[in-house]
Each structure stands twice: as C-alpha cells, then as structure tokens.
Image (cartoon, helix red, strand yellow):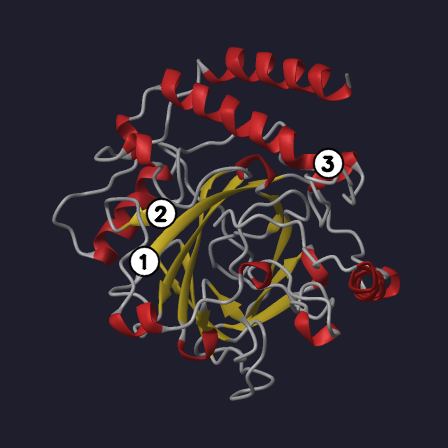
Amino acid sequence: MFRRVMTATILTAASAALLATSVPVSAQTSGATSDEAIKTFIASQVVKGFVPPKTPWGDPDIQGVFTNKDEANTPMERPDEWAGRKMDDITPQEFAAAIVQRQQRAIERAPFAGGGEVEEGIALAVPIHWFDNLAAKNSRPWFVIDPVEGTIPALTAEAQKRPAPPRRELRGGGADTYLDRSMGDRCIAFSMLRNPGIYGNSYQIVQGRDNVILRYEMVHEHRVIPIEGRGAPARAGVPSPMGESRGRWEGNTFVVETTNFQGRMNYRNTSMENMRVIERFTRIAPDKVEWTVTIDEPSTWARPWTYSIPMTEDNSQLIFEYACHEGNYGIANILSAGRALEKAGKPYRTGFRDER
C-alpha cells in the first residue's frame, strides 16, 4: 500500500510539472574539437544575462552548499531509445515520460538498496526517508556531453582483454574477508567520480585566495586544491584515493586537473593509477554551478570523454557528520552472514544488480 500511494503521488506530480519543462540546449556542435564542444556546452547552460559574482579578492565566486539529488536516476549515456538524437532533440513530453519511468524504477528497487535480496524478500535497506532519488526531477536526458553521440568511447584492445571483475565485486565484493569489500564499504573512501545516488548527494565548495576546498558528504571526504601560482600542495607526489589536484582559473571556470590516484581505487574496471581527470566548475546561475568532468585514461578508452552534472545551491542540504566507521556494523554482519550461508550450503550474494 505504501509503495502504491508513493508511486501515484510522485508520478502524478512529475507528469504535471515536467510537461512544462524544456530540455536544456545541449550545444553539441558537430565537427568541434572536444575542448571546444565542452566549453560550448558549458556556455549554453549559463543563464542569459547572468554575471557571476566575485570574491573580495577578485576570483569568480563558486562557493556554497550544493546538492545534485534531483539529478539522481539520470543515465550516464544516451538511452538506446534516443539513438541518433541530441539532448535538445528530446521533446518536453518525451523527457517528462522518461522521468516518470525513472522514478518508477527507483521506487520499485528502493526497499532492496544496500544489499537486500529481492528474490528472498529480504529488505536490508537504509531507512526510506534517506532516499533522495524517489522523486528526483532531472534536468537533462543523460550526462555524457562528449563524444557528441552521448556515449562512452570504445574500449581499447588492451581494455577488452582485461579480465572483468566478478559481477558481485562491481558494487561491493565477497564475504571471505574484509579485504573483499570496496573502500566505500570499509569507510575508507568513495571515488570523486560519483554520480547522484540514493543518498549522500551534498557538496560544499569553500574558496580562499590560494586554495579551493571541495567537501563531499559521502565518507566526509575533502580535497584541498591549490591554485597554480598561489597555493602549494601539502602532500605533493603522494598517491591518495582522491588523487593529487591542481587548480587554475580560465575566465569564470575553475579548472582542476587531478592525477596520482591510488591503484586500489577503481573506476569502470580500470585502475586509476594512470588516469587524468579534468573538472570544470562554472557558476551558471545565482543558485547553480555546472560540474563538468573529463576522464582521460588511454589504456582503457580510445579517447577522453566528458560528462556534466548541474549542482544546485541549497542551504537545506548541509553536510552532516558521516559517522561511517563509528557505526559500520555492516562489515562484521556481511562476514558473519557469509559464514552462516556456508554452513547452510547456500552461496553468498550481495543482492546488488549491475546497473552501470
């Protein structure tokens, strides 16, 4: 009954609101170089006539508390049903219908997020009020803006030969030892390449003259990014889960280049040791910053590719303490459950589905 009422309420409201919503112009220019296409896309998102504010020392002001919770459920790549089309080819009616379907799918799987077994009817989810994605009102059809096709480039020959991790390890791991589990499960770190999810979608940008600090709600991560010619990195040359970043201003855009990731971090079955990530943070409206991410890992993909996610400033979405280690009974329970299943002669399953 709860799910039927929730579904009807969310989907009815979504249908009414989203039919009046236009899809943002993609500005995916045929024939343009990647850098040109990315800059053109960002420029297309800036509200007409908007002049970004400045800090007291003259840099564009991008600081604030942000959330991208309403972008949850948005696919990374262009869906197959829209093959051959650009973002601005999608009509408001089509977009509204797609969001209704996304919300429906989110509601259907919500009780089993976090490790529950749908087949067994066991819901091991976080409390339902934690979920950000059940009524997410997306602002665009998909995230990839380069290549123009809206799809992640082809894998290289090397990457195609690379053994794929077992399906269960894509979002968790086994239950033989705590070392089977991901760094997120172990409360060590989440990747900076995190898309909007079921919860934990708050961020904060803090600016100083010499550094910009990015704070993440998930596992209370933070990055101190020195501005070229001003700040100096505190741990230059030391690999870390969030990498080593340098920042610079290009007009109204804060550009961050990050390398030197720890090898134990993984993204789409590629070690991040050889990865270069270029982020662009641009104030596009009084309450919005566009977060654009370019991924360059030549041993895995035939060319760099870029996705872009809008972040909305919202002081009601403050970052609270993420007491992960303090309450991380999950690891002990996962391992003990694995032993119990072994005694019962049943295989261990995480309950996660590969939704990449």
How far across and how far down the image is residue 60, in percent?
A: 47, 54
The kind of residue on which mark 3 rests is: Pro
Q: Is residue 25 visible?
A: no
**Mark 1 vs 3: CB contact within 8 A:** no
Residue 144, disc: 2
Residue 81, disc: none
Label 2 to label 3: alpha-carbon separation? 29 Å
Name the front one of labels 1 and 3: 3
Q: Is residue 211 visible?
A: yes
Mark 1 = which residue?
305
Q: Is residue 323 left or right of residue 65?
A: right
Q: Is residue 148 left or right of residue 179?
A: left
**Mark 1 vs 2: CB contact within 8 A:** yes
Q: Where's the N terminus, which quadrant?
A: top right
Residue found farthest to the left: 31
Which residue is nearer to you in this view: 280 or 308? 308
Label 1 to label 2: alpha-carbon separation? 8 Å
Label 2 sits on a secondary structure element that is strand
Look at the picture and state if 236 lies above or below 327.
Answer: below
Residue found farthest to the bottom: 237
Mark 3 = which residue?
111
Residue found farthest to the front: 345
How far across and how far down the image is residue 134, in percent?
A: 64, 30
Label 1 sits on a secondary structure element that is strand
Q: Earlier in the sequence, mark 1 or mark 3?
A: 3
Look at the picture and state if 79 lies above or below 238.
Answer: above
Q: Is residue 129 left or right of residue 203?
A: right
